[in-house]
Amino acid sequence: MGATWVAKELLRAVYAVASLGQARKALVAFYRWCAEVEIPEVNRLAKTISAWEAEVLAYHTTGLSNGPTGAVNLIVEKTRRIGHGFRNYENYRLRLLLRCGVTWQTRPAARIRGRQPRLVA
């Protein structure tokens, strides 16, 4: 349990440093730790990070991440699951817009008039 926590903290350290050179050094430290620990999940994490190394290091050159995109995709998936399959695309679209917090101008609803009393005193 402690070894996985250390691996997680070493990976977080890659994003915490200020420059690309320091990020590369932190990533090497992460890879070394994962190679020393004989936990299959940690080794698989190291292989995954190695496959995405260019994208991980790109954070330090651009300063951007795909976190907001992932959050919107999560909202879309939750809405789709809650809807149990929308048959009307327009309803699905409107539900997504409402869920994501998009506001738009709509015409005010027509006022409903009540009935007049039969006998007026």
Image: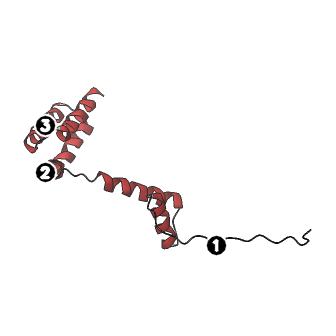
Task: Give the percent coordinates (x, y) of residue 85.
Answer: 51, 65
Q: Which is nearer the N-term, disc 1 or disc 2?
A: 2
Count of numbered labels shown in the rendering: 3
Task: Give the percent coordinates (x, y) of residue 95.
Answer: 50, 63
The residue sitting at 49% across, 58% down in the picture is: 81
Disc 2 target residue: 61
Residue type, label 3: Ala
Q: Which is nearer the N-term, disc 1 or disc 3?
A: 3
Residue 69, labelled with which disc?
Answer: none
**Quadrant of res 32:** top left
Provide the secondary structure element on which disc 3 rests.
helix
- In three-dimensional space, the C-alpha distance between marks 1 and 2, rounded to whole angstroms, equals 54 Å
Task: Give the percent coordinates (x, y) of residue 10.
Answer: 20, 34
Residue type, label 1: Ala
The quadrant of the image that shows the C terminus is bottom right
The quadrant of the image that shows the N terminus is top left
- In three-dimensional space, the C-alpha distance between marks 3 and 2, rounded to whole angstroms, equals 16 Å
Neighbours of disc 2 within 10 Å: few (<14), some (14-19), many (20+): few
Above or below 20: residue 90: below
Residue 26, labelled with which disc?
Answer: 3
Residue 110, labelled with which disc?
Answer: 1
Question: Which one is in front in this view, the residue at disc 1 or the one at disc 3?
Answer: 1
Neighbours of disc 1 within 10 Å: few (<14), some (14-19), many (20+): few
Is residue 105 found left or right of 49 in the rendered image?
A: right
